[in-house]
Amino acid sequence: MSMRAEVVYHLARRDVVKFLRDRQNLVATLVRPLLWILAVGFGLRRAFDTGATGVDFVSFLVPGVATMAVLFSSMFSAISIVWDREFGFLKELLVAPVPRATLVLAKMISASVTSLVEVSVVLLVAPLLGARIDPLGALFAIPLLVAFGMAVSALGITVASRMKTFEGFGGIVNFLIQPVFFFSGALYPLDGLPPALAVVVRLNPMSYAVDATRGLCVGVHHFPILLDVGVVLGTLALVGALAVRSFSRMQA
């Protein structure tokens, strides 16, 4: 194993182990998407027109909630950078003879792994709640969700590299994360939207992650799958480069 690969492995492992050992945060993280399915899925089930999509609302909602889980988990995982800066560990990383891009990659991988734990629970429990999910499609959706999680983590790293307090990071992230989620089609079909809202949804990269996941899991999608994949991967490349640039300019 090369030195860079070893650094990526140990740093990513450190963050994943920290996540798994924090039992209160782990339980809250796993329960949150299931509460969304129970509250929103069953609460709005009768108000949803199944004729518009051909599937039950709970089944329709699950891919959106799975993508939401990736969004929240990956974004907030970047707070570890602020934590490491607060307690001096970041200074040791920044002076180490390792390219900054390697450190960013380790953070992105650890974020995607922790979010994958949450997504797996959602997809495994959803059928017990009445959702009809294609198991093979769900497996194909996982690599795309991993790529989306890495892109979101890169955005979080870009924000965290400029923040020196937990409060500052939380405020900016909440400002970013809410519109990204609500304008993604995670909770509603994209057909028949008002023109202005349709434009916003099309400009939101999460819309394509949700659309691809929903298409693979329940067979309902608005955009071509290849377009969905292309937008997610393009966003990963763009935001990943931005994260490396911001992290490279970072001062401990």
Image (spheres, helix red, strand yellow):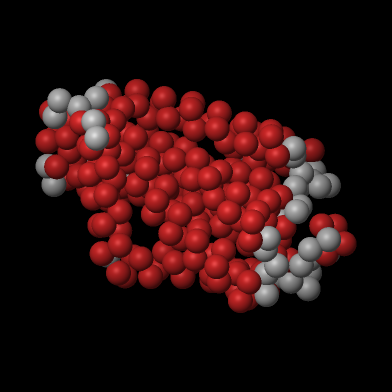
Please tell me which residue is depicted at 15% across the width and 25% down the height of the picture.
97
Please tell me which residue is depicted at 61% across the width and 76% down the height of the picture.
128
- Residue situated in front as seen by the camera: 159 or 94: 94
Q: Quadrant of the N terminus?
A: top left
In the displayed structure, does residue 215 sit left or right of residue 83? right
Residue 66 rendering spot, x and y as whole percentages: 56, 57
In the displayed structure, does residue 121 sit left or right of residue 12? right
In the displayed structure, does residue 207 sit left or right of residue 177? right
Residue 41 rendering spot, x and y as whole percentages: 66, 69
Q: Is residue 185 above or below residue 92?
A: below
In the displayed structure, does residue 88 sit left or right of residue 237? left
**In the orientation shown, which residue stands out farthest toward the front?**
1
**In the orientation shown, which residue stands out farthest toward the right?**
51
| Residue 105 seen in render | yes
Residue 174 rendering spot, x and y as whole percentages: 45, 49
Residue 20 sits in quarter: bottom left
| Residue 169 seen in render | no
